[in-house]
Amino acid sequence: MKAIVIEAPGEQPKLAWQDVEDAQPGEGEVLIRVVAAGINRADLMQCAGGYPPPPGASPYPGLECAGVVVEVGAQCETFRIGDTVCALLSGGGYAEFVAVSEGQVLPVPEGVSIEHAAGIPEVFATAYANLYIEAAASAGEVFLVHAGASGVGTASIGLARLLGNPCYVTVGGEEKMARCLDLGASGACDRHADSFVEKVQDWTDGRGVDVILDPVGASYYNDNLSSLALDGRLVLIGLMDGHRIQSSLVPVLTKRLRIVGSTLRNRSVEYKSRVMSALQSTVWPAFEDASLQVEVDRVFPISEIEAAHNHMRANANVGKIVLKLSR
């Protein structure tokens, strides 16, 4: 089979679509012929040499895909050869075939194209796991989501609208603000022009938000604490803008705040399967009746992998960027 191989990691890595050893399904796994794969910022980090796959995972980038089941391993009970599916991966989406535990696989929702389905698993699993499992949000609690126009950001907006949570976002630019509001955000802040601390105070009449989902890191940390309400939760899912801080612990104590560090890629099969099961029962019906959609910005052929990655590096996307590998 062929896969995208990182020949020389770096900020502008050398990537090659070349022959590699065939993927083989193990016990409890299915083998998927990949039609399309979602791009995530973690892929860029891996290509830069900074985010290696967990032990035992495929060495090739790609944390989500959609395609057709072509082989099933022993003890598989859910899927059959020929099923059209999407999957949450630990790696290997940028390849013609990938093997994955069937607990991390779901049928493509009825009415959703296979290219759009490739953009569902990673971002919706990330948003759901962190907002509703790690932060244990309940209906009516108020969210602030940074990078609201990203894949995870737009998924968070959709989930919050579906599950009854006002969701405010920070974004870069007026066009992205308008798009997030169209998707259902309760309010949006242009990070280039305004202070989100002041916006949160206005939006919540000085109360603060209950949950913040943050991929940014150090530069937002103190303002995040200022923006949280009593018993608020900060879920940190990335360090795009640094990892070292100077801060006071006073608000953590006086407001009874909880700070959660969270990654999904190196979670256990059991945890990922739990998240995917929750998505199937809670979110899949909304995809199928079109009350929820995955926001896809652009679909690139695999031959344009560098252009696709550069599109994400430039923060030019609203929603998902998808790679098309085959028909």
Image (cartoon, rainbow, N blue to C red):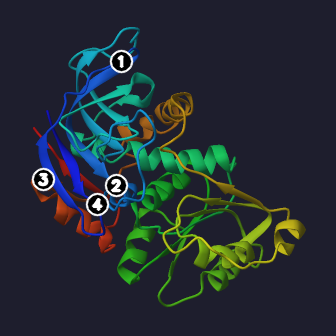
Relative to 142, does residue 53 appear above or below in the rendering? Answer: above
Q: Distance between the residues labelled 1 and 2?
A: 24 Å
The x, y position of residue 72, in whole percent, is 29, 15
Total numbered labels: 4
* Residue to which mark 1 is pinned: 26
Labelled pair 1, 2 in contact (Cβ < 8 Å): no
The x, y position of residue 321, in whole percent, is 27, 58
Of the numbered discs 4 and 2, the one sitting upstream in the chain is 4
Find numbered disc 1 in the image and state the secondary structure of the residue it sits on: loop
Looking at the rendered image, the disc whose residue lies closer to the viewer, 4 or 2, is: 4
- Is 314 on the left or on the right of 165, as rendered? left
* Residue to which mark 4 is pinned: 9
Of the numbered discs 4 and 3, the one sitting upstream in the chain is 4
Q: Distance between the residues labelled 4 and 3?
A: 21 Å
- Is 199 on the left or on the right of 115, as rendered? right
Find numbered disc 4 in the image and state the secondary structure of the residue it sits on: loop
The x, y position of residue 275, in whole percent, is 53, 36
The amino acid sitting under disc 1 is Gly
Can you tell which mark lies on residue 43?
2
What's the residue at 46%, 32% (across, down)? Answer: 280
* Residue to which mark 3 is pinned: 301
Relative to 99, does residue 152 appear above or below in the rendering? Answer: below
Q: Quadrant for residue 204, please give it.
A: bottom right
